[in-house]
Amino acid sequence: MEHQTNHNNQNEQDYGDNPLEVRESDTYQDEYVRSFVDKWDDLIDWEGRSKSEGEFFIEKLREHGAKKVLDVATGTGRLPRAILRQPPFDGRIIALDLSQGMLDEAVRRTAQFSDRLTFIHQGASQLPFKDNRFDAVTCIEALEFMPHPMHVLDELIRVLRPGGVLLVTNRIGPDARFLPGRAFDPDEFEEILQQRVLEQVKTRTWQVDYSLVWAVKDGTPRGGGIRPLPDILSCPHCTGSLVREADSFRCEACGRRYPVKEGGIIEMAEVN
């Protein structure tokens, strides 16, 4: 793999001969150096895709009465931007990512929506939310890069309310064969979802390298809706409830404090 080096010839990205091994190491959160983050949205025409993507997601959110959305591995906030730009959506979004650099860029790019959007610095393997809290949960073009994608999938479903909609992507195309256990044949991936508490599983072509899959969580619709953050958040260390303080959230059970940093980002990944 070629090195990606910034103009000052520092922070080279070199994942060696086994990049998946690196993905499963503690270096995961440091993968995105500043030079890469700055160029991320220029590598692909996200803005050109935004309108069609936003309209599709709005359609799905409307179908399921979704007012509270969780976007996992949000990156630079591309999906929240696409949704919040659509007038029919008047709900709220929580966006989570493990890369601080990506989140800093996301805050900058979504400033106009700051009153309807909350960012959290935290990984996806332990989502800091109570069960059954979101009307819709999304994880787009990221699941195959997670250290334990099936565990993350279970976490996405856990925080989704019964009757809520899950929207995820599955890696396809020629590179999918290099991701065993992370990318699946479309029929196999649908079966994986159907084996969980999901129904109405459907797949459509998304991009050259991805299919988009959506499904509804089984059960009588309950939970979800717009709620105060303390009613949604939980401690990622002990799952205790959090209470809001002046500049942080405090766990009532273990006492850990999660500061609210610049840009309103709730810091959880770096709290021991």
Image (spheres, helix red, strand yellow):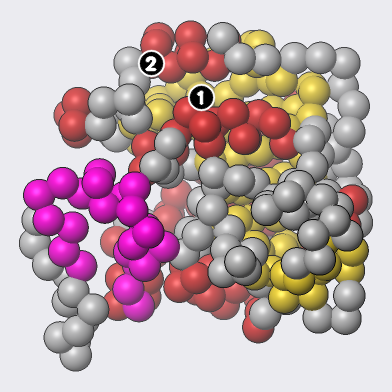
- Residue 120 x %, y %: 64, 62
Position of residue 178 relative to residue 7, above or below, is above
**Residue 229 seen:** no
- The residue nearer to you, when weighing 240 against 113, is 240
The CA span between labels 2 and 1 is: 9 Å
- Residue 191 x %, y %: 48, 9
**Residue 138 seen:** yes
Please name the residue shown 32% across and 25% down the image.
Answer: 181
Q: Which residue is mark 1?
A: 213
Location of residue 201 (image quadrant): top right
Please name the residue shown 71% across and 20% down the image.
Answer: 217
Location of residue 195 (image quadrant): top right
- The residue nearer to you, when weighing 256 against 172, is 256
| Type of amino acid under label 2 | Pro
**What is the number of the mark on residue 186?**
2
Secondary structure under tag 1 reads strand
Please name the residue shown 12% across and 67% down the image.
Answer: 3
Figure label count: 2
| Magenta region | 13-34
- The residue nearer to you, when weighing 111 against 248, is 248
